[in-house]
Amino acid sequence: MSHIHPTAIVDGSAVLADDVVIGPWCTVGPGVVLAEGVHLVSHVVVQQDTSVGARTVIHPFAVIGGDPQHNGYKGEPVRLEIGSDNSIREHATFNRGTPQGSGVTRVGSNGLFMTGAHVGHDAVVGDNVVMANQATLGGHARIGDRVFLGGLCAVHQNGRVGQGAIVGGLAAVTRDVIPYGSAWGNHARLHGLNLIGLKRKGYGKDAVRRLLAAFRDLFEGEGVFADRLRRVEAGYADLPEIMEIVAFIREDAKRPLCLPEA
């Protein structure tokens, strides 16, 4: 049976799993679905039309499922979907989608969203993502799996950060960051590959050496970038990570590509 503190306010249309815990002074609005094991610690607002996956813990003063911060929003039905096993820390804010976008903001599973992290409307966030304190995603941002976003960094609306990448603290990310890339600075520039992330994923020295060679051929080789991209695509076809980077670059994107310093 759900445990709901007597000071909490829960809308009658909310759907709660049997073992949900809702702490003091929380507010759960209409159209909210809380899966098994969800814990709202205290003073949490889950505004409306939001689903929260199993075992996700939301800490005090987080506002989840708030209206999109978009001048064109006029109260239309839009949603926020959050996966399982997330830790959402104090003062984090996740907005619902917009009719002008997909209508849904999506956050994956096993994420850590530290104090003050913000996920803007229509964003798509993958699994095992870490957003450090005050990291911010503009509307329609797309964040791949296993991305680390440093404290106080900001990803521009429609920006992309490929899976396995790391973005340094305070970085202003106005250009797309390739998968497994390491970007930092204001404005952010690409400074190589996320070597720590690759090692944590289990890549050995030989694999990392080949990935670094492909990176150098792509970003530091001779000729124009389009020619280098074709050569890397042909020369490293056996490396799925490089093929993922090539596919990321070729994808129709709304932001320019984050590149190394010229």
Image: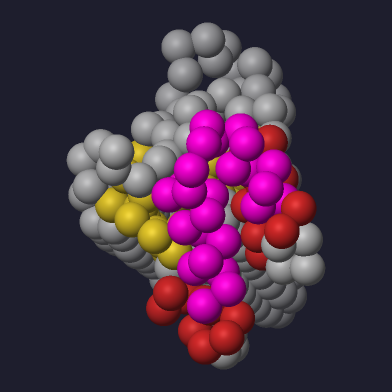
Is 156 positioned to the left or the right of 67 in the image? left
Quadrant that contains the C terminus: top left
Q: Residue at x 50, y 27 (%)?
A: 255
Identity of the residue drawn at 47% across and 19% down: 70
Q: Quadrant of residue 88?
A: bottom left
- Left or right of 184, for residue 253: right
Is residue 8 at least partly visible in the picture? Answer: no
Q: Is residue 226 visible?
A: yes
225 or 79, which is in the foreground?
Answer: 225
Task: Examine the structure image and report whether residue 222 is included in the region drawn in magenta.
Answer: yes
**Residue drawn at 41 percent across, 78 percent down:** 196
Residue 46 picture location, percent across and down: 52, 49
Where residue 195 appears, as percent x and y from the top left, is 43, 74
- In this rendering, the answer to whether 223 lies above or below 179 is above
Q: Please determine whether, in this image, residue 2 is positioned above or below residue 254.
A: below
The colouring scheme, among rainbow, by chain, secondary structure or one colour, is secondary structure
Give percent across and percent down for residue 64.
49, 48
Q: Is residue 258 left or right of residue 201?
A: left
In which quadrant is the N terminus drawn? bottom right
Question: Is the stretch drawn in magenta largely helix, strand or loop?
Answer: helix
Query: In the rendered picture of this protein, how many numbered marks are placed on residues?
Result: 0
| Residue in the image at 71% along x and 58% along y | 235
In the rendered image, residue 139, in percent from the top left (x then y), is placed at 50, 30
Magenta segment includes 87: no
Residue 182 falls in image quadrant = bottom left
Q: Is residue 247 above or below residue 16?
A: above
Q: Which residues are magenta?
A: 209-233
